[in-house]
């Protein structure tokens, strides 16, 4: 499942709530693979929103996998003295790290946050599609339910669908509207009937809350 949204829309919080709920309420262990935030920052930020991942980690219900190094692999990388494609290496490293996390904890839930930096290194759609497919296939083969986050390449109603959107089983779009309202929309969910109306959501001290029966009305409607 792909969570799309611009910076600050709440992708990390949404995914964390998914992992936290699974690990604390429904006996489903979770692994967070972080490409953006080192562990201490993630733990502190989520703790401030009432999610105590340290306790879950101590009870072997949660693991943080640090993948921040993956983003730092230059486009022209080397293994020993052999030049290799840095962007391909980044993908392979990420896939290895995800696999390590899965082997360690046998989780039911996995979050990879975020894949933007890696996949946007393939600006060309023909190259990008197989790269995304690699990640998606590996994740599907693990049998876990996985959320991937990505920044939105372009906004607006006329934007072109990206390969990651075609390949994911489901896509959720988070948007910040011009008047400051936030909206969550399920764009796709393979195999199930979904509510595709944009619904308002807020982020507060206890995290992200969606008003699933309300509509985004007023100025922001239809944008
Ligand atoms: N206690 C809080 N009360 C209200 N809003 C909050 C609170 N804590 C965080 N936020 C809001 O949550 C948003 C950040 O959420 P999050 O880090 O999940 O976004 P993101 O989509 O992952 O961003 P990025 O793309 O930069 O990683 C910010 O807009 C921030 O203002
Ligand atoms: Mg984030």
Image (cartoon, grey):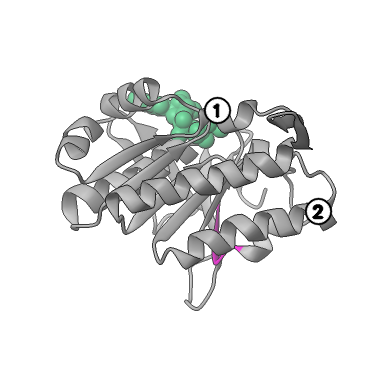
Q: Position of residue 173 (x, y in %)?
A: 57, 51
Residue 23: give x, y in percent of width and height: 22, 49
Position of residue 30 relative to residue 86, above or below, is: below
Closer to the camera in the image, 115 or 190: 115
Nearer the viewer's eye, disc 1 or disc 2? 1
Q: Which mark is residue 193?
A: none
Magenta portion: prevailing SS class: strand
Q: Is residue 9 above or below residue 19?
A: above
- Element assignment for label 1: helix
- Judged from this view, the residue extending furthest toward the front is 81
Which residue appears at 47% of the width and 26% of the height? Answer: 37
Residue 140 in picture, x, y percent from top left: 49, 65
Mark 1 crowd level (few <14, some 14–19, many ≥20, 10 Å Cα):
some
Which residue: 50% across, 78% down?
A: 191
Tell me where the magenta segment starts and ends, as one range: 168-172
- Residue receiving disc 1: 69
- For image coordinates 38% across by 46% down, the residue present is 101
Q: Earlier in the sequence, mark 1 or mark 2?
A: 1
14 and 197: which is toward the camera: 14
- Mark 2 — residue? 127
Query: Which quadrant of the structure image shows residue 208?
Result: top left
Circle 2: is it few (<14), some (14-19), or many (20+) Cα within 10 Å? few
Q: Mark 1 to mark 2: distance in Å?
A: 23 Å
Q: Position of residue 49 (x, y in %)?
A: 29, 29
């Amino acid at each position: 499942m792909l969570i799309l949204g611009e910076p600050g829309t709440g992708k990390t919080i949404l995914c964390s709530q998914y992992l936290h709920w699974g690990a604390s309420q429904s006996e489903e262990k979770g692994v967070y693979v972080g490409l953006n935030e080192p562990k201490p920052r993630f733990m502190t930020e989520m703790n401030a929103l009432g999610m105590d991942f340290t306790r879950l980690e101590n009870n072997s219900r949660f693991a943080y996998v640090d993948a921040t190094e993956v983003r730092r692999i230059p486009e022209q990388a080397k293994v020993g003295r052999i030049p290799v494609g840095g962007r391909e290496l980044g993908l392979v490293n990420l896939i290895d790290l995800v696999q390590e996390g899965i082997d360690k904890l046998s989780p039911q839930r996995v979050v990879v946050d975020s894949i933007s930096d890696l996949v946007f290194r393939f600006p060309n759609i023909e190259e990008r599609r197989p790269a995304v497919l690699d990640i998606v296939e590996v994740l599907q083969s693990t049998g876990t339910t996985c959320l991937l986050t990505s920044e939105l390449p372009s906004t607006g109603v006329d934007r072109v669908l990206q390969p990651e959107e075609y390949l994911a089983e489901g896509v959720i779009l988070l948007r910040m509207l011009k008047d400051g309202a936030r909206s969550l929309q399920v764009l796709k969910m393979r195999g199930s009937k979904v509510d595709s109306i944009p619904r308002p959501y807020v982020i507060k001290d206890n995290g992200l809350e969606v008003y699933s029966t309300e509509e985004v009305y007023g100025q922001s409607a239809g944008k």
